[in-house]
Image (cartoon, helix red, strand yellow):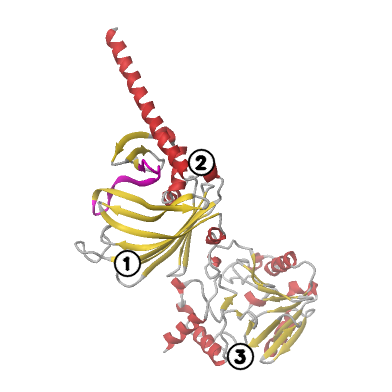
Amino acid sequence: MKKILIIGGLIMILFSMAKAQNADALRVVNSALQALGGEENLKSFVSIYVKAKGIEHRSADTQGYKPDSETTTQHEEILAVFNDGKRLVYEYKTGRHDGTTRWRRVIFNETQRIVADFTTKSVFPAPVRFPSVDRNQDARRIPHTFLLEILANSATLQYLGAKDNQEIISVQVPSAKAPIRLYFDKNTNHLSKYEYTVDFPALGETTAEYFFENYQPHPKLKWFPTKQTIKLGGKIWRTMDVEQVLVDSNEAKTLLELPPELEGFLIPNGTVKEIAKGVYLVYGLSGFQPMFIEFKDFVMAIEAPAAHPSLEETPVESIGNVNAISEEFIAKIKQTIPNKPIKYVVPTHYHSDHAGGIRAFIPENSILLSTSGNKKFYENFAPNLKVETFTNKRIISDGERTVELIDVGANPHTAENIVVYLPQEKYLFQGDLFYFNGEATFPPKDRLTVMPFFAEWIKKNKLSPTRIYGFHSTLYGTMEHIEKILEMKK
């Protein structure tokens, strides 16, 4: 009986000690939060945006030139953490010792983790569930958001004592295998460092340390560290000087969006996007990207898309309504611009995927604009549709908006082919003359007859479009890609 009472007493003592340790650790966390403006104040913010630059020591994590010598590169980064526990953006630009650069933006929105590579101009989306391990790992590099996460996991707190004017606690966060140890300055209550042990590739059991130094006053966050250092196994891996800290900024919101040249990777099928005032693309319309343009009193539709059936399939009639895609295109136009007639429809050329849906425009009383060589073809296919033709160029203008329809003439794809040029925006739309779906696939090897022709035609006609859109491309090309094609030909 006495043994049972003794054991019970020891358990009670240990429980009381653990409770006291937890209370001390919680006190330290609350004091640190108070020093940064208080829990409620920090929770009221939508986002914190931090911009920094510094040096990365690539030998420290076994990524240098030689294992026994120093290899350093420049590093720049932007971190935007949103307090909803979901959204976060981390963009970084880090040099490699071979002279190349890794430049990426990682976006956590409410449903996806998106990695945009600005060097290769490619995008890789993947679904994500919250709470996300990857998202929270990045968020911990801002002490304010890390302390809020620690407070949410206060049941795992433990007070480890004081040393060298630092109070030390540990916390077990959901995504970490080992506890994280945190060090707080006893004079300021600021988080000065956190560390953990990890079995690091090619290094073995190693300590990773994150230092927050030189705290400076901030109008909303009260204090913020202007110098950050990360060490691995006692060696400096990265040092950063903080250049800008913003709260609830437009800069943070902007980071959530992909740049225009990459957004085509992720735009959902059927999305209507205004790429310039009054100029619209319909993305992923059964695999096509037709354009429409708003004038003062009317609309111009570019392309009359239709699915091209395969004669290997029996019966071919199984494709159903030939006009279905163009009817959907017309519906998108009317939803976007409800009170203006579709006065013109302009197929870039006569192929069925570009012009097979022109009969859908008959109820709209649209006028089909084309080159003269295709007039008979269109009239036979859609005899109730009015056809107007031009040679070389046709300009449509209402005094505010001007659109140039230009026949490129005989080319490797067709005898006649129209490009649509918007001189105010310097945008060009074409079909089957130029293909760009990202740097990784440019130039497509199966299009190396028509694309050199188009590049030479652009130069010969002294056009310099800032964006080149295509009926079969979700992204747009630039003159940089035209020059690349010309260099390849040389």
Residue 400 visible (yes or no): yes
**Residue assigned mark 3:** 409
| Quadrant housing residue 345 | bottom right
**Residue assigned mark 2:** 39
Between circles 2 and 3, the one closer to the viewer is: 2
Specify the amino acid type for callout 1.
Thr
Q: Which numbered marker is on residue 73?
A: 1
Above or below, 403 against 152 in this view is: below
Quadrant location of the N terminus in the rendered image: top left
Q: Is residue 384 left or right of residue 47?
A: right
Q: What percent of the width, then of the height, locates residue 181?
A: 34, 41
Task: Check disc 3: other Cα within 10 Å, few if <14, some if 14-19, many if 20+.
Answer: some
Q: Earlier in the sequence, mark 1 or mark 2?
A: 2
Residue 113 visible (yes or no): no
Whole-number angstrom distance, CA of label 2 to CA of label 3: 68 Å
Between circles 1 and 3, the one closer to the viewer is: 1
> Magenta region: which residues?
183-203
Q: Is residue 318 left or right of residue 252?
A: right
Q: What percent of the width, then of the height, locates residue 178?
A: 33, 41
Q: What percent of the width, then of the height, locates residue 305?
A: 66, 72
Q: Which numbered marker is on residue 238?
A: none
Q: What percent of the width, then of the height, locates residue 103?
A: 42, 66
